[in-house]
Image (cartoon, grey):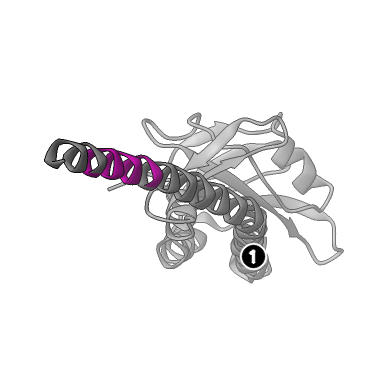
C-alpha cells in the first residue's frame, strides 16, 4: 500500500514538474516573442528620432559656419586677423581644425597646414554656393577621423570668393548615438547610402 502511494506520489511530482516545465517554456517563448515585437515596433521610431537629431546637429553647424562666413574678416581673408577668430570659433563649436580655402581649392588651416581640396565634392559644391559635409576621412589629420564641413564665402556681389572649412571629429556623432541607444545591451550605428558604417557607438 505504501509502495503504491509512494509511486503515485512520484508520478504526481514528475507530472507536475513536466507541466511546470512546459508552462515555463511557453512563457519564455511568449515573452521572447513579445520583446521581439516591441523591438520591431520601437526601433524604427528610435532610428528616425536619432536621424532627426543628427540632421538637426549638422544643421546647427551649417548655420554657425554661415554666420562666420559673413564676417568681414572672413571675406577680406586677412589671415593675421582671421586666424585668431577661427581658433576661437573652432574652440567654441568643438572643431578639430578650421581654415579658409581660396577659389582654387588651396586650404590654409589654423594649424598652418596646407591642403589641396579642389577635387573634393564638398569644395565643388561650395563653389556652387551649397553647404555640405563629407564622409568621415583621415586624410587631414593623423590618427583622427573627421567630417569636412564646407561653407561658401560670398563677396559683395554675392559671388563665391572662398570656402570656409571646418573639421568635425567623428566622435561627436558617436557620442550622440551612444546617448540615444535603445537600451544598455544594444549597439547603434550610422550608415551611409552605400550601407557603409560611418559612425558607431563606443561602449565604456
Residue at 14% across / 36% down in the picture?
Answer: 3
Question: Along the line of sight, which residue is nearer the eye, 1 or 166?
Answer: 1
Looking at the picture, how far across and down is residue 98, in whole percent?
50, 51
x then y, percent, for residue 72:
64, 70
The image shows residue 179, relative to residue 71, as above or below, that is above
Q: Residues within 10 Å of mark 1 (few under 14, many from 20)?
A: few
Task: Kindly tell me whether residue 130 is visible in this rendering.
Answer: yes
Is residue 25 rendered magenta in the image?
Answer: no
Residue drawn at (61%, 49%), measured in percent from left and top? Answer: 149
Residue at 78%, 62% in the rendered image: 155
Which residue, as the protein is rendered here, is positioned at the far left?
2
- Of 19 and 189, nearer the camera is 19
Q: Quadrant of the N terminus?
A: top left
Q: How many marks?
A: 1
Q: Is residue 99 in sight in this rendering?
A: no
Residue beneath disc 1: 56
Percent position (x, y) of residue 7? 21, 36
Left or right position of 82 against 163: left
Q: Residue furthest front?
A: 1
Numbered range of the magenta stretch: 9-19
The chief SS type of the magenta part is helix
Q: Residue 64 appears at what percent x and percent y?
A: 60, 68
Using the rendered view, name the quadrant where residue 184 is placed.
Answer: bottom left
Disc 1 secondary structure class: helix
Say which of 104 and 23 sits in front.
23
Please indicate whether residue 84 sits to the left or right of residue 67 in the image. left
Check residue 17 for magenta coloring.
Answer: yes
Amino acid at each position: 500500500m505504501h509502495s503504491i502511494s509512494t509511486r503515485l506520489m512520484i508520478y504526481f511530482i514528475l507530472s507536475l514538474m513536466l507541466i511546470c516545465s512546459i508552462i515555463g517554456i511557453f512563457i519564455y517563448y511568449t515573452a521572447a516573442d513579445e520583446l521581439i515585437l516591441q523591438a520591431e515596433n520601437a526601433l524604427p521610431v528610435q532610428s528616425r528620432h536619432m536621424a532627426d537629431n543628427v540632421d538637426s546637429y549638422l544643421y546647427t553647424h551649417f548655420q554657425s559656419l554661415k554666420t562666420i562666413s559673413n564676417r568681414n574678416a572672413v571675406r577680406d581673408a586677412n589671415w593675421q586677423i582671421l586666424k585668431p577668430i577661427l581658433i576661437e570659433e573652432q574652440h567654441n563649436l568643438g572643431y578639430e581644425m578650421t581654415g579658409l580655402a581660396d577659389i582654387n581649392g588651396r586650404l590654409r588651416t589654423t594649424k598652418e597646414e596646407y591642403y589641396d581640396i579642389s577635387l573634393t565634392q564638398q569644395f565643388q559644391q561650395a563653389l556652387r554656393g551649397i553647404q555640405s559635409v563629407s564622409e568621415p576621412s583621415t586624410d587631414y589629420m593623423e590618427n583622427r577621423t573627421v567630417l569636412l564641413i564646407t561653407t561658401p564665402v560670398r563677396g559683395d556681389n554675392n559671388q563665391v570668393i572662398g570656402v570656409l572649412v571646418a573639421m568635425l571629429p567623428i566622435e561627436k556623432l558617436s557620442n550622440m548615438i551612444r546617448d540615444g541607444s535603445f537600451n544598455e545591451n544594444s549597439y547603434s550605428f550610422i550608415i551611409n547610402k552605400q550601407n557603409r558604417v560611418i559612425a558607431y557607438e563606443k561602449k565604456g
